[in-house]
Amino acid sequence: MKILIACLFAFVPVITAAGCRSGPPRQPLLVGVDANYSLEMERAGAKWKWDGRETDLFQGMAAMGVRGFRVRLWTTDDGPYGRRYAAEVIKRAAAAGLEPYPVIFLSDDWADMLKQPLPAAWKDLSFEERTAAVKDYSREIVAYLRNEGLRGHIYAIGNEIDFGICGEYPGDEADKNPAALRERYWPRSAELIKASQAGVLKSDPEARFMLHIAHWWDADFCEAFFHFMIGRGVRVDYAGLSYFPSSGIGGSLETDQFGDVVSRLAGAIGRPVVVAETAYPSTADFAGQFAGWKHEAPGYSLTPEGQRRWLADFLSFCASHPAIQAVYYWSPEWYGEGMWKAFALFDPEGEAKPSWEAIAGFSL
């Protein structure tokens, strides 16, 4: 039976400090992807294959049990991840039976835990003017996407906004601990997020909101961030976390350790958790930006079979965790000999890796 995000996220359960859920029964775990390179790759001639048969990527992923799609949205009109590109991704995902949700970056370029650049169009604005521009943009972009076919009501405001958003970001030498962030960067970030949420609600009164950070290894930081945002009037319906166990960041490798962070966070704020980004490598033979992400999770080799086993076990773990409602695999489509080849779920020739069996087996 088709599982829709609209149904899966139809309620926000109360989660106690012990991690137990009250309210309606638990819904099945939603398995989704962030596959936003797909259209660029397709236009460059990329093909995706399962068992040697070329298949439309979106249709193929849906056939393997994927149900959700995380859509990257920058403030540009044209080019990769701008509004027209995002609208096409939404249409393709919806046509395949997937349920997309937009990630409103509030940036015209990559924004994550390491950077949160201010869009060029807003650089000369005062903070008050920028806040108004964020509200107007959010109202207009959601109206545009809904007119283009967006039917779900989940919106993530920002991407890995641990330290700030939309130009509010500490410099390289600045302290990035919660005490320093509360003093300078989180207050203005909260105002920008609230402005974005207000704009979204103008165009979609049924909107529900996710905030997404990347401190999967640090429960204290996670609690501090979400407590601050909720205390400042930011609406948080879902807490999003990245989880990349092979990165070695924070020494976080074991799934149980991640689960403890999730339990503490969910118990502290009473919101369900979404794993907004995750991936695990199938080889140690890769270079580039993520070259250091080669730490084996205990028991899972950096091989195609190790990747399959890790993904199968991680999905099962998330399905059994009372606070986790969805998991999104980051860039399964991004195959080739580049920096993400180990994490992709297709080999360098575009053939599906065994890890798709983990998704298909979980979803049956």
Image (cartoon, helix red, strand yellow):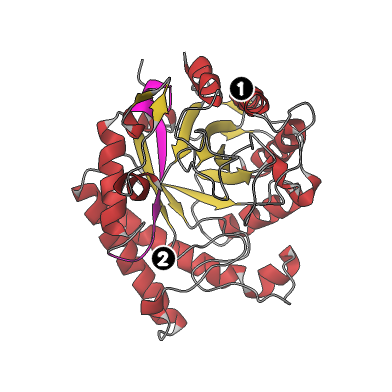
Residue 171, position in %: x, y? 66, 76
Q: Residue at x 46, y 81 (%)?
A: 127
Numbered range of the magenta stretch: 60-77
Can you tell which mark lies on residue 312? 1
In this rendering, which labeled residue sits more in front, label 2 or label 1?
1
Q: Mark 2 Cα within 10 Å, few/some/many (few <14, many 20+)?
A: many
Residue 63 as seen in the image, left or right of residue 231: left
Q: Quadrant of residue 46?
A: top left
**Is label 2 in a helix, a strand or a loop?**
helix
Does residue 316 show up?
yes
Q: What is the x, y in percent for residue 260? A: 75, 36
Residue 190 higher or lower than 294, as above or below: below
Q: CA distance from mark 2 to mark 1?
A: 39 Å
The front one of 163 and 153 is 163
Q: Give the SS element for disc 1.
A: helix
Which of the two residues, 264 or 344, is positioned nearer the viewer here?
344
Could you say where residue 299 lies in the image, as x and y percent from the top left? Answer: 78, 26
Q: Is residue 75 magenta?
A: yes
Q: Is residue 44 above or below residue 178?
A: above
Q: Residue at x 57, y 33 (%)?
A: 14
Kind of residue sitting beneath label 1:
Ala
Vertical position of residue 158 compared to residue 261: above or below: below
Which kind of residue does numbered mark 2 sit on? Ala
| Res. 245 image quadrant | top right
- Give the residue number, with chain letter if any, for mark 2: 195
